[in-house]
Image (cartoon, rainbow, N blue to C red):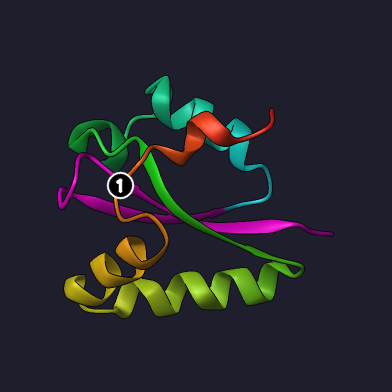
């Protein structure tokens, strides 16, 4: 598979429930999350605001970063989000479909 690949963090609200995922099409994946089209954690927790993402050329790099972030302490994840998105804006509104 060729890139780009994205590791992303969703939130239910500022300092709310966080979800970390990986995809090769962030705009499409956000439409799925926002449309609540797939049952699971994000649908139950209402985590559908894109508050952070990173881009990678390789799926292996993206999955390694996803795995690393999932092991981080919650405070570290919040610091990461707030460094680049201090207002917790929904970045999905800024994606090109």
Identify which residue is drawn at 31% across, 79% down.
Answer: 71
Identify which residue, 16 or 89, lies in the foreground: 89
Whole-percent x, y for residue 4 in the image? 75, 57
* Residue visible at 49% across and 28% down in the picture: 32
Could you tell me residue 61's position as x and y percent?
65, 76
Find disc 1 in the rendering and name its residue: 88
Task: Depth check: give the residue in front, 93 or 87.
Answer: 87
Quarter of the figure with residue 94: top right
Residue depicted at 25% across the width and 53% down the height: 18
The quarter of the picture where the N terminus appears is: bottom right
Vertically, is 19 above or below 83? above
| Image: 31 above or below 29 | above
Q: Position of residue 51 (x, y in %)?
A: 38, 48
Q: Residue at left 51%, top 75%?
A: 65
Q: Is residue 37 visible?
A: yes
- The boundaries of the magenta stretch are 1-22
Count neighbours of disc 1 (C-alpha within 10 A) and say few if under 14, some if 14 to 19, many if 20 or more: some
Which element is circle 1 on? loop
Picture quarter containing residue 13?
top left
Is 20 in front, or is 54? Answer: 54
């Amino acid at each position: 598979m060729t890139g780009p690949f994205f590791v992303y963090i969703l939130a239910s609200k500022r300092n709310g429930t966080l979800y970390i995922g990986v995809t090769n099409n962030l705009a499409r994946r956000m439409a799925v999350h926002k449309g609540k089209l797939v049952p699971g954690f994000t649908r139950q927790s209402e985590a559908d605001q894109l508050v952070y993402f990173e881009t990678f050329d390789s799926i292996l790099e993206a999955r390694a970063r996803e795995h690393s972030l999932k092991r981080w302490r919650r405070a570290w994840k919040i610091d990461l989000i707030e460094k680049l998105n201090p207002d917790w804006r929904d970045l999905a509104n800024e994606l090109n479909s």
